[in-house]
Amino acid sequence: GPWRTVLVMAGRGWGKSRFGAESVNELVMEHGYKRIGFIGRTSADVRDVMTHGPSGVLNVGPPEYRPKHYPSKRLLRWPNGAEALTFSADKPDQLRGPQYDLVWGDEVATWRTRDVWDQISFGLRIPHPMGARAILTTTPRPKAWLRAIMQDPGTVTIRGRTLDNAANLDPEQVRKLLLRYQGTTIGRQELDGELFDEAPGARWKRATLEEYRRQDVVPLALRERWVLGQADDTLRDDTAKAVLASLRLTRVVVAVDPAVSAEEGSDETGIVVMGSDRDGHIWLLDDISGRYSPNEWATQAVASFHRWKADRIVAEKNQGGEMVESTIRQVDRNAPITLVSASRGKEVRADPVAAVYEQGRAHHIRVFGDLEDQLCGWEPGDADSPDRLDALVWAGTELIGSESLVIGPGESLDHTPWIEADYRS
């Protein structure tokens, strides 16, 4: 096709290096590219991955397509006379001067400076009937210049996951990696090949969510079922029983942020379950948010209320007024309900809850990908109103209570009798 840059952004073990090596060999031997640049993160990466590695140009494709390597000259030469110079991204000044009709850059998201790509672009100027081209392979990391490449109309982006190539990887190691990292920020980046950023002014940070995540309160057998995507009511029931037996929670609430409609493309109804303990920590226990009719979201909320032995359902009434309460009463007439109204701006409501997270006293018992994306993607002033985030803020506000759990300078939570007193009341 008419591409000028192909960007392969995929998880570990997907086959990025092999893609680059075989593509270069084919373009050289079948399409007449003659002057090539190889750029790796370091000189060792060029040698051990791009050239001599199991998927390097010296070891893939038909033998008659493979070049010879002259390390002292930093040179590769193919049977048809085409040549490639090798460069380290750690030394961008090396790239000033040489010119090419084809380049291959590997693990470009790890390059320390944008100057490397700029220098490559200046040198990618030798004419060719198919056009001067760049092949970029990488595991994704949030880099502004990488996003700019993706948005260029001449760029074709190929994505992939580690699991796409599972048949050629050690099955037990893949299982362990999935169990440990599936759904986490690093797992989504390194295994699923996702590229995502935090909003510059986000109140929640991915690093904080990861640092204080407490998946250890969920038994290993249940965690494996979550990783394998076996989420159903039985798994949720089993998880709730195990976690409630493990944690000494003083309160549990279910928070609901109802959507106006359940039509395709409409907002979701946010439904989250949170608890607090005697040490002043809050715990995200479940997220059942989705696109529901009024009866469906009320049924989900009540089911979560009983599953987690909650003491209250907190529901925002802005979107439905008293109809919100009546909808829940149709499912369970005796459920204790607190209706809340968003009379203050979201930033004012969210800040105390975000502060508890920042202080390391909020824990997620598993990975809640969609909710965590909303937390880390929202910043004050955004016009949209994330539903899952809203529900979490309502739950956190209810648990924090009238006396804030946010620790001020010089304060501590060694003695917090109000928590137990508030629970008794």
Image (cartoon, rainbow, N blue to C red):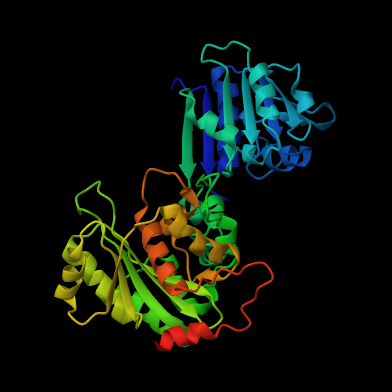
Q: Who is closer to the viewer here, 142 or 60? A: 142
Residue 166 sits above or below residue 271 on the image: above
Percent of width and height locating residue 402: 45, 73
Q: Residue 332: image x %, image y %?
A: 19, 78
**In front: 418, or 23?**
418
- Which of the 4 image quadrants contains residue 41? top right
Q: Nearer the viewer, residue 77 or 36?
A: 36
Horizontally, is 16 left or right of 78 in the view? left
Which residue is found at the position 63% from the left and 37% from the top?
A: 108
Task: Pick out the residue farthest to the right.
Answer: 72
Q: Position of residue 224 (x, y in %)?
A: 46, 71
263 vs 364, left or right, is left
Quadrant holding the C terminus: bottom left
Of residues 67 and 102, the one nearer the viewer is 102
| 283 relative to 111, above or below | below
Residue 290 in the image: above or below residue 232: above
**Position of 62 compared to 378: left or right?**
right
In this picture, residue 408 sits left or right of residue 366: right
User: Residue placed at 73% from the left, 41% from the top?
Assistant: 45
Q: Quadrant of the N terminus?
A: top left
Q: Can residue 423 be seen in this view?
A: yes
Looking at the image, which residue is at 57% across and 41% down? 16
Q: Is residue 80 visible?
A: no
**Residue name at image x 51 percent, y 47 percent:** 193
